[in-house]
Amino acid sequence: MARTSLQTAPADLQLICANAVVAQAGGARVLPTSSRQLDATSYSVDVDAGGRKFNCVVDSSGGVKSVQPA
């Protein structure tokens, strides 16, 4: 699998997004599946919660900006 030049979110920010989805997941296993940098301070993280897909936007300081069903 080849990596592209796109920046992915650091692992700690991916986990912050996964934790933000837990409340909406109804006890399902939550797993970040992909991420990408949106701008200098924001990342988008795709999260799978038991087959339900979510998108989380988090800033570089760990603040969750939004969690939306995908």
Image (cartoon, rainbow, N blue to C red):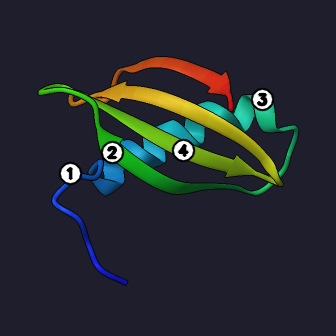
Residue for point 69% across, 51% down: 48
Q: Residue furthest right?
A: 26
Crowding near pointer 1: few (<14 within 10 Å), some, many (20+)? Answer: few
**Left or right: residue 44 compared with residue 69:** left
Which badge, 4 or 1, comes first in the chain's sequence? 1
Position of residue 44 relative to residue 9, above or below, is above
- Label 2: few (<14), some or many (≥20) within 10 Å? some
**Disc 1 marks which residue?**
7
Disc on the earlier residue, 3 or 1: 1
Disc nearer the start of the sequence (2/3) = 3
Amino acid carrying label 3: it is Gln
Looking at numbered disc 4 in the image, what kind of residue is underneath it?
Answer: Asp
Q: Quadrant of residue 19?
A: top right
Q: Picture coordinates of residue 1 (x, y %)?
A: 37, 84
Cα separation, mark 2 vs mark 3, equals 22 Å
Element on which disc 4 rests: strand
Q: Which residue is mark 3?
A: 24
Give the residue number, with chain letter if any, for mark 4. 46
Q: Earlier in the sequence, mark 4 or mark 3?
A: 3
Residue lying furthest left: 40
Neighbours of disc 3 within 10 Å: few (<14), some (14-19), many (20+): some
The residue singled out by tag 2 in the image is 36
Q: Position of residue 70 (x, y in %)?
A: 68, 32
**Residue that lies at the very extreme toward the bottom in this rendered image:** 1
State the count of labels: 4
Q: Are marks 4 and 3 in contact (CB under 8 Å)?
A: no
Considering every residue shown, the one lying at the far top of the view is: 65
SS type, badge 2: strand
Q: CA distance from mark 3 to mark 1?
A: 27 Å
